[in-house]
Image (cartoon, rainbow, N blue to C red):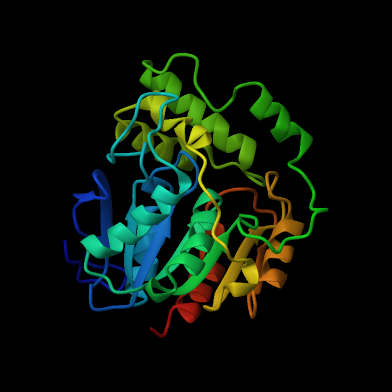
Amino acid sequence: MVGTGMDECRIEDERIQRVNGVDLCSQAFGEPSDPAVLLIAGRDSSMDWWEDDFCRRLAVGGRYVVRYDLRDTGRSTTYPAGEPDYSFADLVDDAVGILDAREIASAHVVGISMGGALAQWLGVLHRDRVESLTLVDTSGALPGMPDDLPPPEPELADYFRSGGLRPEDATDTAAVVEHVVEGQRAFARGPFDEDRWRSIATRVVQRMPSVPGGLGNHGVMRDCPSPDAGLGEITVPTLVVHGTADPLFPLPHGRALARAIPGATLLPLEGVGHEAPPPSTWDVVVPALLRLTGNR
């Protein structure tokens, strides 16, 4: 689809491609000739958490924005609950595979939470494919972080212990939507826009063919060796975006990450929790991303 207004852009239909022996679903906004931005979602999260309007704003700013469903999310390949036949390293390779499938030589990589960890591995294992890194609400996934960083907030730890990551009845679509909304309530901070979260959750569940796998398999992936590299070996321009009220990785994680990566800068989002940047922050976050990704 091609828009004609100042705030419109080319948006392609979802595309399922064979990547690393599995089917991965992706979608792009903007013109392929523009600098590419690859958005990587967090644990158990499909590409839907990168909202359409957020992607559209980046595309209108002259970026070719690609978002995709990780394995066990959205329309990508799913596995039986508790039996994911892949490792973290496979998810890293999938990100490169998406670039290959779309014939993108290199991209500016934006990852949130676990997606930020994947982005860090990309930054040292596939340096030639990464133009810059934006690490959102994440912590260090490579050596170089201090040992005294604060743990998750007690209330969030209680949520994990209560089994809050998996609904009681995965066959009840309405119940699963409610479960996803309540999960976001546990991670978000500040005013909770229930209508917005419910709209996103409904789309997430509608696109999720395997609810049991799609809500937990990332937590039980196969172990794999970490790269023989540290945060100090990331050489691309890096922006660390971190909510000041993040209950999973409190702000000191973001500060430490920005200090550990040479030349990295920190963009704190006041009052934001562990969540993709909400619309109230886009007037700050989108220009920052456009500045970082302005040059190939």
Res. 278 in view: no
Q: Residue at x 66, y 45 (%)?
A: 189
| Residue 157 x, y percent position in the rendering | 72, 32
Residue 159 is left or right of residue 41, and the answer is: right
Residue 255 is left or right of residue 285, and the answer is: right
| Residue 19 x, y percent position in the rendering | 25, 51
Residue 69 to residue 173: above or below: below
Q: Residue at x 77, y 44 (%)?
A: 151
| Residue 223 x, y percent position in the rendering | 52, 40
Res. 250 in view: yes
So how many labels did they put on this image? 0
Residue 150 to residue 126: above or below: above
Quadrant placement of the N terminus: bottom left
The residue at the far left in this view is 1
Quadrant placement of the C terminus: bottom left
Residue 30 is left or right of residue 239, and the answer is: left
Please tell me which residue lies in front, 51 or 78: 78
Q: Residue at x 68, y 24 (%)?
A: 161
Give the quarter of the image for residue 230.
Answer: bottom right
Please tell me which residue lies in front, 16 or 244: 16
Residue 268 is left or right of residue 233, and the answer is: right
Q: Which residue is drawn at 53% across and 62% down?
A: 120
The residue at the far right in this view is 148
| Residue 138 x, y percent position in the rendering | 61, 55
